[in-house]
Image (spheres, helix red, strand yellow):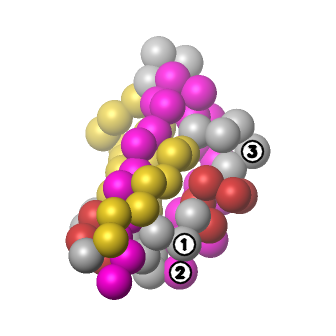
Amino acid sequence: MKKGILTFDNESCKGCELCVTFCPVEILHLDKERMNSNGYHLISVSDIDKCIACAQCAIICPDSVIKVEVEER
């Protein structure tokens, strides 16, 4: 089974939420508590163990903010 490891370039994130919309397992959300230095809210992961490493979030991100690594289990 594949497990995803997500890393974010928080300073490049504009909080557009495209990754949230396209995540098939619905584990991404806009964190209203955290912001980058540009004033944009950041994306957070609610349950990384549910990530299936599909990389839809990284593919759809217009600013290449998300990196997906695959860990085989």
Percent x, y of residue 22: 62, 71
Please, is residue 45 above or below residue 10 in the view? below
Q: Which residue is mark 3?
A: 62
* Numbered label tally: 3
Within 10 Å of the Cα at label 2, are there few (<14), some (14-19), or many (20+) other Cα atoms? some
Q: Residue at x 34, y 35 (%)?
A: 34
Q: Can residue 51 be seen from the camera position used here?
A: yes
Percent x, y of residue 39: 51, 23
Percent x, y of residue 2: 37, 76
Is the C-beta separation of discs 2 and 1 under 8 Å?
yes
- Which range is magenta? 1-24
Percent x, y of residue 17: 59, 55
Q: Nearer the viewer, residue 16 or 8?
A: 8
Cα–Cα gap, marks 3 and 1: 17 Å
The quarter of the rendered structure image containing the C terminus is bottom left
Q: Residue at x 51, y 23 (%)?
A: 11
Cα–Cα gap, marks 2 and 1: 9 Å
- Residue type at the position of mark 3: Pro
Please, is residue 65 above or below residue 5 in the view? above
Q: Which residue is mark 2?
A: 24
Within 10 Å of the Cα at label 3, are there few (<14), some (14-19), or many (20+) other Cα atoms? some
Closest to the camera, between mark 2 and mark 1, is: 1
Q: Which residue is mark 1?
A: 54
